Image: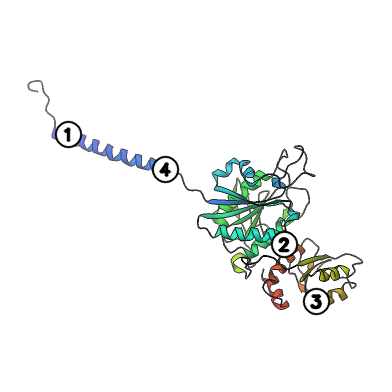
Amino acid sequence: MKDGHAKTSPCRSLVCGLLIFGSILGGSAIAQTQTQASTPVSLPHVVVLATGGTIAGTAANETQSTGYKPGVLTADALLKSVPSLGKVAQVSSEQVANVGSENVTNAILLKLAKRVNQLLAQPDIAGVVITHGTDTLEETAYFLNLVVKSDKPVVLTGSMRPSTAISADGPSNLLQAVTVAASPTARGRGVMIVLNDRIGSARYTTKTNANTLDTFQSPDDGYLGTLIDNVPHFETAVTKLQTTQTPFDVSRLDSLPEVDIVYGHQNDGGYMYDAAVAHGARGIVVAGVGAGSESLLTLPSIKKAIDKGVIVVRSSRAASGYIPEDPAYLGLLGDNLDPQKARILLMLALTVTNEPNRVQEMFHQF
């Protein structure tokens, strides 16, 4: 050393410079990575359309599960009851109706279907959930399955207990329905029914018990899938034509043809068929016994109805099963549709054709 000053090595200066430069670059890269990681991922937009039912019902006390008033809570109130909805989707809501499902009319069906199609045509909307009373939920679901013109998820849900019950099932069902509607894996599966951890097809799912939580079953073809830890797992798919594959267009319809169901039983006479025709029915679904059998006493009235141009379709009052060809009975074959769903399909078929052979083809296709 000289004059008390140390000489700086050129090599040491180069190393220090590289270290400083590297730390600047590294710090910048880390900061950029942290910024990217903290950017929130955009959640899919799901619209909830509320129509009333038990899920929006209230009772006098927390143990009451019958005799409550359905259709009390608004759509917004339903969403507020499930704060975790915001973790799976951006959720907005609209009130289409607020009734018990026994009071769902053809006018409500058309209003609902048109709104669903309008919403799904918007590119920023991933799917639609419909809250509905369970008593006729399957009818609305199947109707939508035939008239929705999109492959985006449409999910119907409800509850068996009112919102005031100590163990109300509505919030969980709503969360699961929104989760399915937001899932890319749910696209192209037709309209679905989601309750009690199960994902069912609108075509095959039916209410089987008036009281229990596991009321919705798919007796002929099983479930589409299940939810585990609020994650949908799909196992099967529907092969019948649905949604975008059907010829039904409700966009310009203000009403639907009158179709009635006549329930078969012992000592069944024909006057119910006569009354339906006199009332102006364009179609009649026979809820026949067994595999769609008709009482001998009813055959003259059924023949008169057919002769007047009324389309008659045979179905079964049993929970499941197919309707076979049988020359002893009159009417088209309802495939394996239950009477209430056969009525839905016949109403829509009559908006397209009055030709029996074409209607029969539709019952095999849809």
Q: Amino acid at mark 1?
A: Ser
Residue shown at the point (77%, 64%) measured from the top left? 339
Q: Give neighbour class at mark 2: few <14, some 14-19, many 20+ (Cα, 10 Å).
A: few
- In terms of sequence position, does the residue under pointer 4 or pointer 2 come before the other? 4
Task: Please provide percent x and percent y for residue 331.
Answer: 79, 74
Labelled pair 3, 1 in contact (Cβ < 8 Å) = no
Residue under pointer 3:
306
Instruction: Locate the N terminus and report the quarter of the image it occupies.
Output: top left
| Residue 37 marker | 4
- Distance CA(mark 4)–CA(mark 2): 47 Å
> Which of the two discs, 4 and 2, sits closer to the camera?
4
Query: Is tag 4's residue or tag 3's residue first in the polypeptide sequence?
Result: 4
Answer with left or right where residue 325 lies relative to residue 237: right
Q: Is residue 265 visible to us here?
A: yes
Along the line of sight, the residue nearer the viewer: 268 or 256: 256
Query: Does residue 329 appear anywhere in the picture?
Result: no
Is label 4 in a helix, a strand or a loop? helix
Q: Depth-wise, is mark 4 or mark 1 nearer the camera?
A: 4
Q: Which residue carries the number 2 mark?
A: 220
Kindly report the distance in space between the C-alpha atoms of the residues bearing marks 3 and 1. Answer: 102 Å
Q: Nearer the viewer, mark 1 or mark 2?
A: 2
How far apart are the two marked residues, 4 and 3, measured between alpha carbons?
68 Å
**Of the residues shown, which amino acid type is indicated by label 2?**
Asp
Q: Nearer the viewer, mark 3 or mark 1?
A: 3
Sequence-wise, which precedes: disc 2 or disc 3?
2
Q: Which quarter shows the C terminus? A: bottom right
Q: Secondary structure at mark 3?
A: helix
Q: Which residue is mark 1?
A: 13
Q: Residues within 10 Å of mark 3 (few under 14, many from 20)?
A: some
Q: Amino acid at mark 3?
A: Ile
Where is residue 152 shown, x and y percent of the image? 56, 59
